[in-house]
Image (tube, rainbow, N blue to C red):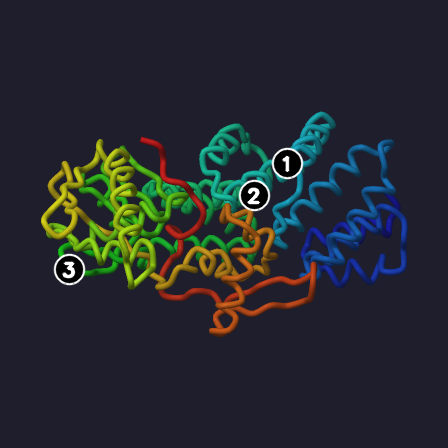
Amino acid sequence: MDSIIAAAARALAGGDALGALKLIALRDDAPALALRGIAMAQLGDYPLARDLLRRAARRFGAREQLSHARCVVAEAEVALAMRDLRGSPRTLAQAAAALEARGDRSNALQARLIAVRRLLLLGRLDDAEAALARLHVNGLARSLLAVAELAAAELALRSLKTTPARAALARAQQAAERAGVPALLAEVAEAAAALDRPAARRVEAGHERPLLLEDVEALHASGALVVDACRRGLREGATSLPLARRPVLFTLALVLAEAWPHDVDRGVMIERAFRTRRPDESHRARLRVEIGRLRALTKPLARIEASERGFKLTPRSGRVVVLFPPIDGEEASLLALLGDGAAWSTSALALALDTSQRTVQRALVELEAAKRVRSIGRARAQRWLSPPLAGFTTILLLPASLPDG
């Protein structure tokens, strides 16, 4: 490594991106391209950073596998910052293995942390937990330790395990303070604040009140039948019934739960579930079919009984509680993702929400008309942003399926 490249690398390590660029801005060799890419990433120009890192990786080629693997990891981190989730996990895993084999444990760990954070964005909590369990962070840089603990804290929060989340955040705070990285300290503070903000609204027998994440965790452990409109499913203790992919059944369950302990008129159920105000005999027949399906699915949790005017939900636990999102509207999960302050593409949003890109595009058009989101760029470069959602946490609205019972 020549002296100019070494000086630029030291400047980047100290957070001086502009100082590094002054040294290497006119150079076009592979090491300079890689450092320029990292500098542009630090300055927030992710598209240019990605292009520079790709060019550097190509120039390093197969003969310089260590440098090539480092470029792949840096590009993956830029892609994560851009919320581009389309990259192949296999490429990143191969880079991590190449780095580990050549003794670069820090960058290998960085690669695996990027993979964990990608899994968390996609809501694949079980896979993220397994990947985190395989990490060995002892003896590595404190900044990497802080990132690992932040990932562990987010996993715990998304899994509604607030005590482990607090412990992980305390360790992340300690590591970030020792590392002296302001961005990490800010990220830890933001994650910790989620524990003290309302996460959902509880409705029981017509009364509503806000709940913290700890309250939601306690409610799930109470034995009550929880109809969760945040994650679209039913849960009683350790038994859960995900209905996110069956919107009609979930709507029927929600209508029944809102009315508990009373029954619900058939006309009201048809209007809510099928979105029609002029029901005919075909709608009534469809209602009977859907109620039959819901009755079979909810058998371990509750009974659905016919009444003179409609249907009634009778929980086996003796109590029904409804959880509503802290944000009104069907686009709550979409706004929760955009509320992290990053610029998302429609393809990444569709991947994270496990829905079609066309569905996301329609929702974004409606939100843009209501001035709740804005777009930057055009065509394939178009990205979507939303102001941070202050006053409450969106943990329960982020992608995550309910655990199987």
Q: Amino acid at mark 1?
A: Pro
Q: Secondary structure at mark 3?
A: loop
User: Alpha carbon of mark 2 to alpha carbon of mark 3: how far?
Assistant: 39 Å
Q: Secondary structure at mark 2?
A: helix
Q: Residue at x 32, y 61 (%)?
A: 276
Give the camera-side residue of 403 and 32. 403
Give the mark nearest the N terminus, 1 or 3. Answer: 1
Q: Which label lies toward us, 2 or 3? A: 3
x, y percent for residue 361: 56, 60
In the image, residue 345 above or below residue 307 = below
Q: Which mark is residue 89?
A: 1
Q: Residues within 10 Å of mark 3 (few under 14, many from 20)?
A: few
x, y percent for residue 119: 53, 40
Q: Which label lies toward us, 1 or 3? A: 3
Q: Amino acid at mark 2?
A: Arg
Q: Residues within 10 Å of mark 1 (few under 14, many from 20)?
A: some
Q: Residue at x 50, y 55 (%)?
A: 187
x, y percent for residue 262: 11, 52
Give the camera-side residue of 164 and 345. 345
Q: Which mark is residue 206?
A: 3
Give the camera-side residue of 295 and 48. 295
Whether residues under marks 1 and 3 lie with C-beta atoms below 8 angstroms apart, the answer is no
Q: Classify residue 376 as left or right of residue 98.
A: left
Q: Classify residue 18 as left or right of residue 188.
A: right
Whether residues under marks 1 and 2 lie with C-beta atoms below 8 angstroms apart, the answer is yes
Q: Classify residue 357 as left or right of residue 188.
A: right
Give the mark nearest the N terminus, 2 or 3. Answer: 2
Q: Which mark is residue 264?
A: none
Q: Residues within 10 Å of mark 2 (few under 14, many from 20)?
A: many
In the image, residue 198 above or below residue 94 = below
**Residue bearing mark 2:** 118
User: Alpha carbon of mark 1 to alpha carbon of mark 2: how far?
Assistant: 9 Å
